[in-house]
Amino acid sequence: MGPPSTEPPLLPMFDIIDPANRNDVVLVGKRLWDDHALGYVRDCNWLQHFENAADPYHLVVLHEMISGDQFKSVLTLGNWPAIWFDRTKLGMKYNLVRKLPNGLILERHSECIVPNIVLVANVHQRGQQPIWREKATEVTWCVPVDNETVCGLSVIAWPKGADGKPDPKWKPGTDTISDIRPGQLRDRPFEDKQRKPDDMEAQEGQRRIARHALENLGTSDMGIALLRQTLRKAMLDVQEGREPQNLIRDPEQNRALETSCWNTVMTPEQFEQVKQTLPAEVVRRQAAPELQTT
Ligand SMILES: [Fe+2]
């Protein structure tokens, strides 16, 4: 929030929620999604929740290999994906490319925006037909309640119905209130939580405040490391008297800030056209899909 003497910064107007950029939506504020999923008040430090969106490996390891398919969508449908990470204008993102069982190819990104915002693309997407850049539909803040508790607050770009009000038939991309995964329930038997852990167990199971000194980060944790580097830079900026990244005070600068979070589902022909923009390793793995079997 900055020193008390300074004015609070503006609510950042990301491209997916900027009313000047989107006249097809109504902005709806929500604690996502009541007592489930991203809106859950979790009994752990906020960073453990924030890091979720920088870790696509857990989609396969936690939500598929350990606990059985917990999404039944492009997140868990298919083979082992190619994964890599990039910085973005606002923070960092993961990149995930995988061949789907129907032969189409998924390109997916989630973005972590400094200091505590996550963008997650539609988790219900099943990849049945090609779709180009299906962007995230909500902006979610991982809000620390205290050092050992976090909750999620979201601004949702909700499509307008015929009456100009939020369309009741539409379902947000990360909605889990109308499609609750069993693992999102807090009151599960202990054995069930142990045998089929979900995000809650993965995040809270690190202790109330995870001890980073006990970790042995590997190559699959490069996203976590990149996110922590990005946060450390912002903290250093504050410590040394500079404004941290993404702090906006000028309304002229606060317009349709470019986000980098979406699902794209491509045909193999479309993939041929975009593959020169991807790292060589990704292209090699797509050419040899037998290497991707989980
Ligand atoms: Fe998860």
Image: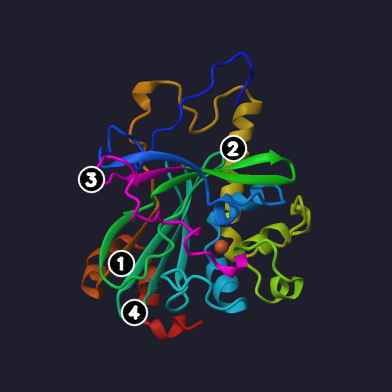
Question: In the rendered image, which residue does mark 4 sit on?
Answer: 287
- Seen at 53% across and 64% down, the residue is 180
Percent coordinates x, y for residue 221 in the rendering: 60, 61
Q: Quadrant of residue 31?
A: top right
Please provide the residue range marked out in magenta: 155-183
Single out the mark in the foreground, 3 or 1: 3
User: The residue tagged with tag 2: helix, strand or loop?
Assistant: helix
Q: Amino acid at mark 4?
A: Ala
Specify few, some or many for label 2: CA neighbours under 10 Å numbering under 14, 14-19, or 20 or more: some
Q: Main secondary structure of the magenta part?
A: loop
Percent coordinates x, y for residue 36 in the rendering: 58, 56
Of the image marks 4 and 3, the number of the one nearer the N terminus: 3
Please, which residue is most extreme toward the top here? 5
Q: Amino acid at mark 1?
A: Val
Single out the mark in the foreground, 2 or 3: 3
Question: In the rendered image, which residue does mark 2 sit on?
Answer: 233
Single out the mark in the foreground, 4 or 3: 3
Q: CA distance from mark 1 to mark 2?
A: 34 Å
Specify few, some or many for label 1: CA neighbours under 10 Å numbering under 14, 14-19, or 20 or more: many
